[in-house]
Image (spheres, grey):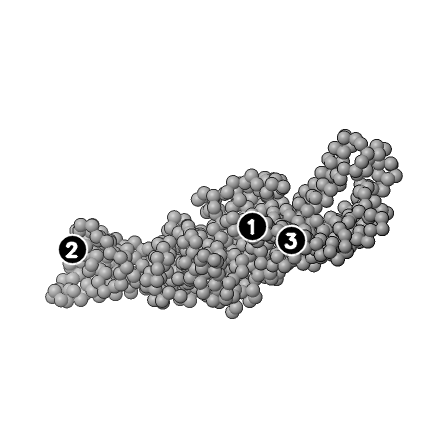
Amino acid sequence: MPEMAGLDEGGPLFAQIAERLAGEIADGGLAEGARVPSTNELAAFYRINPATAAKGIKVLADDGLLEKRRGIGMFVATGARQRLLARRRAEFTERYVEPLLTEATRLGINSDELIALIKDTSSERGGVPV
Amino acid sequence: MTPAISATGLTREYYDQVALDDVNLAIGARTITGLLGRNGAGKTTLLRILAGQEFPSSGSVQVFGSAPAENQDVLRRLVLVREDQAYPDFQGYPNFKVSHALRAASFCYPRWDAGLASSLLGDFGLRAGKAVKSLSRGQRSSLGITIGLAARAEVTLFDEPYAGLDAVARQIFYDRLLAEYADFPRTVLLSTHLIDEAAGLFENVVVIDRGRVVLDTTADGLRGTVTTVSGPVLAVNSFTEGRPVWERRGLGSQASVVMVGQVSGEDRERARSLGLDLTPLSLQQLVVRASAGPAGAGSLTGRTNA
Amino acid sequence: MNTMIKVARYHLVMPGMFLGLPWATLAGVFAANVARGGDHFRGGLAVFFGMFFITGVQRVGGWLPFGLALGATRRSFYAGTALLGVSMSLVSGLVIAGLQAIERATGGWGLSITFFRVPYLLNGPWYATWLTSFVGLSALFVYGMWYGIVNRRWGMLGLLAFIAVQALVALAVAFAYTRSSGGPLLLRPADGHPASLSALELTGVIAALTVVFLVGGQAAIRRVTV
């Protein structure tokens, strides 16, 4: 879809809108207490139906990540960033750490060995210091 | 809540064909719905009946709760922009101008906005003083769109209104439609076969094929439901095992399979690790499938052909 | 009523065409008459009357589709258009009567021209001229509308059938009348002939026909599609 500024046909648009906004909050692009773009602004920017944009916002609002201030608009709730980051960590743990531990156990690698393995691999890659 | 537009058992027959066959619809107020389908599917007939310009053979339609045909109360709150709109521009009246058309429309639509009309003329590069007879196809379409949007009618119907408009002008139309809808919400039914361009506009889509409704759902509800999985044959087979599949294609060691079902985050990871490419079917492709027959539509929604 | 006004306003977005063209044509024919000279009646006024018929046809043929698109109902489009035509006929008839009076007063515009004095039909007092012109123009306009509608609904074949049926009906009426009155139907008052009609009676007949045209047109437009 050429004109939708990065949205794709892979899933519901409202969910993609919600994800993008959540990403902005988690990355700090949308600070706590900052005003979130209005439904119409989002619709115009992404060239989508305002109802779809509204649904995306509603998802975040229902989740407590956004709060409505009557007559002014939607704002990022306090603690939203923390909650999103915590959620990401939880997802990371579930998706990567848990399977890692399961597999390590199967191979007979204990936690200390596992940590040493991670450190060695990390320094070989010159990547994120652990 | 009463739907703004509804049809019950709507049928329209001509001597040699059935244009609409037992159509049942309910379209909510202040939504934008895409009316999709192939040429000759029955979209135009449906829109004309909704606008009171054609009559049903059997069944009924309602706009704002009553039949639109010959109904002044409904018709002044409704506008239909047709691809082939005829204006009084034939032999005897070579000078029926764009401005005349707009003036006539201003009498007939209580919410007509003249300022919007001139702004739209400017957007499309259409001069008010030009004779309608001398307009190109694209300019006629621009005129139709201008009238359709400036009327600010509570029910606004578009029947493939973009004939002769290039991609830039079409985008102007979509943008203005969205802006107008945001400022003055109205019930919009847009018939088009250029689906992907307009896909973002639709909250709902109705697909008509050979006079019957084959799909009636939210646009978001369709997105991502069908995906093309391609890559090495074994990997593709492993990935798609146990999942409903519409089509399989192979060439040597490569395969491409059209798979039904939402693709989760885990699925994506797995596909990546297997070296597979996942491409969701666009709305246009999904509609093409739905128009291909009962099998396609049924798999999409889990319902049998309506 | 409201919608009929809207329809009338729609027709008048180009007032010049609707109101001015017949008069412009009339002026042209009149000028041609003057140029040719002579003092006998040549029926130039018939062109003006003919234009009302053509206008009636065009107002349906050309203006109906966009009218319906703008949300007029067929009923209100018919009524509004007919009303406009009849109003125009009323005013035009008065103008013709006026011009006739001037023609009489000036002895045929100083040139012995008989243009607005039509033997038998428009030769009486101004109010009779007004009435007959009004009825005649209205009849032609509404008749034209009916043709326009028939053409829209049933095309060329329909038109031919329409004309054929009317011809048959006219023949039947003439036949029946001739048989019952024992002589041919005469329009011109032949002295003492019992079967002739006065201009006023003829006006009455045309008025009755106008009602027929109105009913026919209204019925035909009901299911017209554009």
Q: Which residue does the numbered mark 2 point to in the structure image? A: A120
Q: Residues within 10 Å of mark 1 (few under 14, many from 20)?
A: few
Instruction: Work out whether residue B66 can be spotted.
Output: yes
Examine the image and state in which quarter residue B131 appears: top right
Q: Position of residue A120 (x, y in %)?
A: 16, 55
Are callouts 3 and 2 both on one chain? no
Badge 2 density bin: few <14, some 14–19, many ≥20, Cα 10 Å: few
The reply to whether label 1 and label 2 mark residues of one chain is no
Q: Quickly name the residue at label 3.
A: C168
CA gap, disc 1 and disc 2: 93 Å
* Disc number for residue C157: 1
Mark 3: which amino acid?
Leu
* Residue B181 located left or right of residue A76: right
Residues tagged 3 and 2 counted as in contact (Cβ below 8 A): no
Mark 1 and mark 2 in contact? Answer it, CB < 8 Å. Answer: no
Circle 3 packing at 10 Å, graded few (<14), some (14-19), many (20+), is few
Tell me the mark number nearer the camera, choosing from 1 and 2: 1
Q: Is residue C174 left or right of residue B29?
A: right
